[in-house]
């Protein structure tokens, strides 16, 4: 996995080889290739130790030998930059180089690889696989996805209850394309050495509530001041937000304040607001309130873009609170059908009125919700229990999903309406904002009265 560093045996072998002055540059390079392989990762201190050895060796020699060792320092950092586990130290690693060496490393990596951060890989990636460093980024994305394999499997099996006919939906590698042609990732797929990959990558992992602490108020105030500088372009502001999200955890309120730094009525800044939402998605300590922020802050066009980038299932289904609210689902979309089946299951299990004011436009064409010209022409409709096993693939459905206050409280407290269920992610009070409330309907609500 990506958190596994080379063993002490391998690292000691590598260190001894670097300290061996009789080895040629080529032999040292071969040793580094052998020890790193395709799946070896290093800690910041290990890389610095190897750099120190090369620096010490360079000081012992003058002329060609010294120049050669400096070139090796550049090669070492370039090769291991994307293999460093504690990525938060990437700038510290570059600080170990002189200005000329650093410029060479940045030039060799290129902007795509240089700015990639496995701590926060959620976002759009376009990678030229003929470039070895961009290919390495793709390898890292696969490593991150594989590290989430158990989470994805548990997530799918947990939410596939009540039926055996749920469609399989891709949660991590979204909209994956090779040379412009969509394809589905499988564990047997190997990264080719030619071609261009495009993917919206989503990191499903949530911040550990026992370890993750949001950026403190004074530091965040300085971030806001920096982002709001009038001489900065919208794209520069997004870069600032991405950089801070890579290093720090945030709250939903802090994300909302960052979104407020951009004018939603300006097209270019509206697009940047979507990028801010994507950059912050996997870094929110109180992530269960994310839908509330989207509802309050986003224009419909922004909301649609965020859903397209991150996926509705990733955004909404924590099961505890996110099902409650208003839904518009396009039955031609496999992910929307998957969500509807989950809602039908919840409605069949939870007491009281749940699906309220449901309407269907059964003649809506595929992708209608994404069309600005589409006008919903729905009729009142009771969603049948049979849809748990078989949802039609045409039409648009709109409805509210509701719960009574006591049911909401039980979900937030235990993760299940009856207090006996096995929640997907056990509720932790730190994953909610302070005084968090989920909208509720009266206990005596009856839609037919």
Image (spheres, helix red, strand yellow):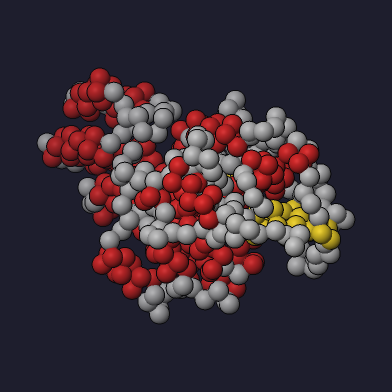
User: Is residue 339 in view from this perspective?
Assistant: no
- Give the residue at the far right of this rendering: 363
6 versus 349 height, above or below: above
Q: Nearer the viewer, residue 280 or 312?
A: 312
Q: In which quadrant is the N terminus drawn? A: top left
Going 46% across and 48% down the picture, which residue do you hit?
Answer: 412
Total marks shown come to 0
Going 22% across and 47% down the picture, which residue do you hit?
Answer: 96
Q: Is residue 289 left or right of residue 98?
A: right
Percent position of residue 177, x then y: 65, 43
Q: Nearer the viewer, residue 175 or 337?
A: 337
Q: In which quadrant is the C terminus drawn? A: bottom right
228 versus 274 height, above or below: below
Q: Which quadrant of the figure has residue 364?
A: bottom right
Percent position of residue 221, x then y: 31, 70
Q: Which quadrant of the figure has residue 171?
A: top right
Going 62% across and 46% down the picture, which residue do you hit?
Answer: 351
Q: Is residue 343 left or right of residue 102?
A: right
275 versus 383 height, above or below: below
330 versus 4 height, above or below: below
Q: Is residue 14 left or right of residue 443?
A: left
Going 38% across and 50% down the picture, which residue do you hit?
Answer: 429
Percent position of residue 199, x then y: 59, 46
- Give the residue at the far bottom of this rendering: 230
User: Is residue 46 in view from this perspective?
Assistant: yes
Percent position of residue 60, x then y: 12, 36
């Amino acid at each position: 996995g990506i958190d596994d560093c080379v063993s002490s045996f391998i690292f000691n072998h590598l260190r001894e080889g670097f300290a061996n002055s009789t080895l040629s540059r080529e032999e040292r390079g071969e040793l580094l290739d052998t020890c790193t392989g395709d799946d070896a990762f290093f800690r910041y201190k290990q890389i610095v130790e190897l750099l120190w050895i090369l620096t010490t060796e360079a000081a012992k020699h003058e002329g060609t030998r010294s120049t050669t060792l400096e070139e090796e320092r550049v090669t070492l950092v370039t090769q291991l930059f994307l293999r460093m586990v504690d990525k938060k130290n990437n700038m510290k690693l570059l600080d170990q180089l002189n200005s000329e060496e650093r410029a060479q490393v940045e030039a060799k990596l290129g902007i795509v690889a240089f700015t990639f951060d496995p701590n926060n890989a959620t976002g759009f990636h376009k990678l030229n696989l003929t470039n070895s460093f961009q290919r390495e980024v793709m390898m890292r994305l696969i490593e991150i996805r594989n590290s989430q394999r158990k989470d994805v499997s548990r997530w799918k099996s947990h939410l596939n209850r009540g039926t055996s006919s749920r469609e399989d939906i891709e949660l991590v590698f979204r909209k994956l394309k090779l040379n412009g042609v969509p394809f589905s990732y499988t564990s047997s797929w190997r990264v080719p050495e030619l071609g261009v990959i495009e993917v919206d990558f989503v990191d499903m992992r949530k911040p550990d509530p026992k370890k993750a602490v949001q950026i403190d108020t004074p530091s965040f105030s300085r971030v806001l001041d920096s982002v709001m500088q009038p001489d900065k372009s919208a794209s520069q502001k997004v870069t600032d937000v991405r950089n801070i999200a890579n290093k720090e955890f945030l709250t939903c309120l802090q994300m909302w304040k960052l979104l407020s730094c951009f004018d939603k009525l300006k097209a270019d800044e509206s697009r940047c607001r979507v990028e801010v939402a994507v950059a912050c998605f996997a870094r929110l300590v109180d992530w269960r309130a994310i839908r509330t922020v989207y509802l309050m802050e986003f224009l419909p066009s922004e909301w649609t873009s965020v859903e397209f980038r991150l996926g509705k299932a990733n955004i909404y289904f924590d099961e505890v609170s996110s099902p409650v609210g208003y839904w518009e689902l396009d039955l031609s979309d496999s992910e929307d059908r998957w969500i509807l089946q989950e809602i039908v299951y919840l409605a069949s299990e939870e007491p009281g009125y749940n699906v309220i004011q449901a309407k269907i436009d059964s003649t809506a064409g595929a992708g209608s919700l994404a069309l600005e010209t589409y006008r919903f022409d729905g009729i009142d409709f009771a969603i049948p229990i049979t849809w748990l096993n078989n949802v039609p693939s045409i039409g648009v459905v709109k409805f509210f999903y509701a719960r009574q206050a006591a049911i909401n409280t039980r979900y937030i407290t235990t993760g299940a309406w009856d207090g006996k269920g096995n929640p997907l992610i056990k509720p932790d009070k730190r994953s909610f904002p302070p005084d968090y409330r989920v909208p509720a309907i009266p206990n005596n609500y009856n839609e037919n009265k």
